[in-house]
Structures are given as structure tokens and as C-alpha cells.
Amino acid sequence: MLNVPSQSFPGPSSQQRVASGGRSKVPLKQGRSLMDWIRLTKSGKDLTGLKGRLIEVTEEELKKHNKKDDCWICIRGFVYNVSPYMEYHPGGEDELMRAAGSDGTDLFDQVHRWVNYESMLKECLVGRMAMKPALPKDYHEEKKVLNGMLPQSQVTDTLAKEGPSSPSYDWFQTDSLVTIVIYTKQKDINLDSVIVDHRDDSFRAETVIKDYSYLVHVALSHEIQEDFSGLFYRKCQLVSKEDMTHDTKLFCLMLPPSTHLQVPVGQHVYLKLPITGTEIVKPYTPVSDSLFSEFKEPVLPNNIYIYFLIKIYPAGFFTPELDQLQIGDYVSVSNPEGNFIISQLQELEDLFLLAAGTGFTPMVKVLNYALTNIPSLRKVKLMFFNKTEDDIIWRSQLEKLAFKDKRFEVEFVLSAPTSEWSGKQGYISPALLSEFLRRSSDTSKVLICLCGPTPFTEQGMKMLHDLNFSKDEIHSFTA
Ligand code: FAD
Ligand code: NAP
């Protein structure tokens, strides 16, 4: 069963509370959690005000719906009435209003491309944008902003007209986007049933419905950059789940046989699970199976396992569901994302890692990779912030590694230690950092990586700037 918290969200000590600056989550009113939103969408209430009717929306019409109590937003050609969602939006009403009455696709992609809005907002769907008349070819050839065009004369419709349903398709475009919509008339169709390929100016989408396969193959008059509505997911099987601390587990997932996926050092993926009928997505950073696993890039093609260290929050939304999975169950895993560039490690001499709680996860591969592949490396120091000794992930492995490899040192800092703790205590501070961040020489090439609760990372960044480390010497892991 889901544990549905009833207090105001996020809780006073919740990781969801974000300090000022950056893209903040705002405290939501009581009864406005994600679970409350899902309940509302399942209540049968008319959330669009159109009594279930879908309409074609012109740009002029879209522009009119630009107020909080009447707010329409277009994402990838689909228009949603987001007014009922306002109070449930974790980023706050003002953030949502930035796209009111307009095409919010770019804004949405900048902020949270990974959020599964089709599922979250399906009851708010007003309809789709009305097709713009195709522009004459010589016009769009001059305008470099166009990614592609689909002059109707070049569209070949090869959809079968028989079978369990008769899918149809159409397309529309904005100045920078061409969207092809295939109406399958099937409930809950998922990405596994759709194969999409594009090469140069040819676009091909095969949709498998029951025993039939439907093909849309179109010739574009221009090359397009691909954007198949967000991330691609594949279903992976849970192979093992082991306790690493009282609340953190090592999950091992097996990739499908036809998939080769290697998550680059410093990048994360999104895990997706259906929770009470809505697909929920959260980011997680794959780790190696241990600190001693041999680290070679690229990994062998037969590497079919992907590991995650995940903390289970009893009152959390996603992790209790993940924890409920049985061995053999499936979870969807996205393609990797992230802005860590591995070349930042080249010729590095000093690597400093500042991690808090599960903020340790991106450090695992960075640490392994640097110790194995960077010959110039003189030292790697990890400062690991936790509440208590029991919360320290892989403590004995870290201590063994420090014993085995003299370049590596680890220091644990606890915010709520027992009286027996003789190590460092407290929170990230300028005093702790200036003592810890000693270069091996005045001119050594340094990188400092930070990861943890958002306020920890933000405060740490500020302290590092105050200590005169340059932007190029700092990498913070964020969403
Ligand atoms: P949430 O529902 O988000 O709850 C989080 C906290 O808020 C919990 O303490 C919960 O008790 C509290 N809370 C929830 N609802 C309420 C309420 N109504 N009242 C009071 N308190 C409440 N995590 C990992 O464990 N491993 C990783 O490798 C990892 N990698 C990440 C990579 C990135 C790029 C990012 C951004 C995050 C990563 N995370 C990782 C964090 C992860 O994405 C989730 O945020 C985390 O698992 C919590 O999800 P949840 O839905 O279970 O909890
Ligand atoms: P936690 O146990 O709550 O906190 C770890 C340590 O950080 C504790 O000592 C805690 O102290 C301290 N801390 C918390 N807030 C702080 C703040 N504002 N300033 C200074 N210290 C602070 O951590 P967790 O539950 O494991 O959460 C880990 C976080 O890392 C999550 O928010 C997760 O999203 C994030 N994460 C991000 C990535 C990424 O790539 N972006 C990857 C993995 C994890 P007290 O609790 O005693 O206050």
C-alpha cells in the first residue's frame, strides 16, 4: 500500500524544501500533494471545462487563456488547461504562468523534460493546436530556424485501413517543431509498441497494435533534429535488492537482451513506475556494484546489469513503491542525462568530492574512473556528510579503499552523532572546507564535485566561490 502523508508538503525537514535561488520548489498547501492530484484526476471531474470534448486550438484562442483561473499551455502541439493543476505544481503557480496562453515546450524542456506530463495532465487536455498552412518551399529554405517541413504532397500515408482499429495520423508544425501525431484509438499504448527511426529527411514510425503493425513513412523536405517527445524508456527486470544501510538499498536491474546502454560517468537516468495508474518518474544515478569493481571504459558489450543505491523514504511517493517490487518485476529506465563532462578529469591532479547522504551516488563512478584512468592524479579526497554513523553508505568499502590506495582519503562528518563519535561533526562550513581542500601544489589542476540536498549544494557552491575556486574547478550535480 502507498503511505500517503497528510501533513503539509514538503515537511519541515524534507529534501523537497529548497533554499532561495535557483529553481525552487514551493511549499504546497495541505491536500495538494502529487497523490492528491492523482486522486482529483481519477475523480471524473471535468478538468478542462469542455465536458470531455477535444478541440482544435488556434494561436489566437490559446493567447486568450492567459489568466490563473483560465490558463491554457501548449506542450509539443497539445494544449492543456492547467488552471486546476496550479496549486499542485511543485514549482509554484508563477512558474506555470510563465507559459500561460503560449507554447511552453521550450520552457518545459529547460526545466523538466523528464516529467511525464502526458500522463500527469491527461485529464486537462483541451485538444491540439490547429495546423498552420504549410509555407512555400523557397520560404522555409531561406529561414534557417525551421527544422523541417512536411508539405502535404510529400506525405505518404501507408496506414492500414483494416485490423482491430483504424489508426490515423496527422501533423502540424510551429516555427521550430514538426509534430506527427498517430491516433491509435488504443488505451494505455506505451513506447514499447512504437518504433521510430529517422535518417536525413526520412521519418518512419511503426506502431504495433495487437497482431497488426502500422507504418507511417514520410519524406521531409528538410533534415530534422530528432526530438521524440522526451526520453526513451526500456523495461528492466529487478534482479536483486540488498540492504546497504538501514534505509538504503543496492538495486540491480537487468537490461533487455536487445539493449546496449552504458550510463556515462556523472550522468543519471530516470526510473518510471505506474503508481495508481499514473506514470511517475524520478532521477537516479547508477553506481558500480562496489568501489572495487574494475572500471574500464567502455564496458564490455555483455554488461547487462545496472546498479542503483537508493534510499527509501517511508513517507516518500516513489521509493516505497520501488521497494515493493519483487525480484523479476519490471521498472522502466530512461536514456542517460547530465552535464558532467568526463574530460574535466583529464590531467587532473587533485580531486575533491563533497557528498551528503545519497549525494554520494555520482561520486562512486567518478571516484572509480579517476583512480583507474587518470595517471596524473595525485590525490582524491571525499568528505562525506551524514546524520549518524548508521547512515554512511559503503563505509567499510571506503575505509578499505583508503587503506589499499594511498591516493584516496575519506573523512566522515556527522550532523547528529552519538556521544561515542570522535570524528568531525556539524554541517558544511567554510572552516571545514578550507582545511579539507588543500592542493597538492600551488598550481595543481583541481576539480571539486558536490552533491547532496539542494541547499547543501547551493551553500557549498557559495563557500567554494568565496574560497576563490573558479567555476571551472567546481562541478555540482543537480537535476
Ligand atoms: P518524495 O515524495 O520526493 O519525498 C521526499 C521526502 O519528503 C521524504 O523525506 C518524505 O518523507 C518527505 N515527504 C514526502 N511527502 C511529505 C509530506 N506530505 N509531508 C512531509 N514530508 C513529506 N536518490 C537516491 O536514493 N539515489 C540516487 O542515486 C539518486 N540520484 C538522483 C539524481 C538526481 C539528478 C536527482 C535530482 C535526485 C536523485 N535522487 C537519488 C533523489 C531521487 O530522485 C528522489 O528525489 C528520492 O528518491 C525521493 O523520492 P520519493 O518520491 O520517494 O520521495
Ligand atoms: P540527508 O540524510 O537528509 O542529509 C545528509 C546530510 O546533509 C546530513 O548530515 C544532513 O544534516 C545534511 N544536510 C541536509 N540539509 C542540509 C543543508 N541545508 N545544509 C547543510 N547540510 C545539510 O540526505 P538524503 O536524504 O540522503 O538526501 C540526499 C539528497 O541528495 C537528495 O535531496 C537527493 O535528491 C540528492 N541527490 C542528488 C543527486 C544529483 O545528481 N543531483 C544524486 C543523488 C542524490 P541534517 O539532516 O542533520 O540536517
Image: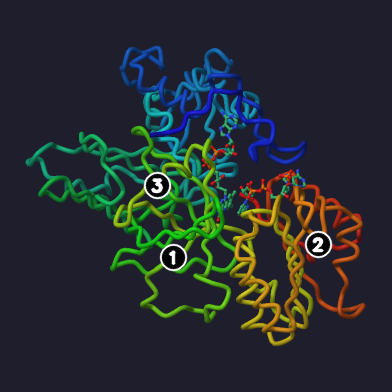
Picture layout, residue 429 above or below residue 313: below
Q: Which mark is residue 149?
A: 3
Mark 1 or mark 3: whose residue is earlier in sequence: 3
Nearer the observer: mark 3 or 2; the answer is 2
Residue, disc 2: 423
Q: Which mark is residue 306?
A: 1
- What's the distance in space between the residues labelled 2 and 1, CA to CA? 34 Å
Where does the image place residue 462, in percent across and percent down from the top left? 84, 51
Is residue 81 rendered to the left or right of residue 106? left
Residue sitting nearer the eye, 133 or 320: 320
Does the residue tagged 2 have its C-beta within 8 Å of any atom of ligand 2? no
Residue at the front extreme of this rendering: 420
Query: What amino acid does circle 3 point to?
Result: Met
Point 70% across, 53% down: residue: 386
Picture layout, residue 62 above or below residue 315: above
Give the position of the N terminus as an image quadrant: top left
Is residue 165 rendered to the left or right of residue 441? left
Mark 3 or mark 2: whose residue is earlier in sequence: 3
Point 46% across, 24% down: residue: 37
Query: What kind of element bears circle 3?
Result: loop
Where does the image place residue 428, in percent across and percent down from the top left? 81, 53
Graded by Cα atoms within 10 Å as few (under 14), some (14 to 19) or many (20 or more), the crowding at tag 2 reads: few
Nearer the observer: mark 2 or 1; the answer is 2
Is residue 369 rendered to the left or right of residue 406? left
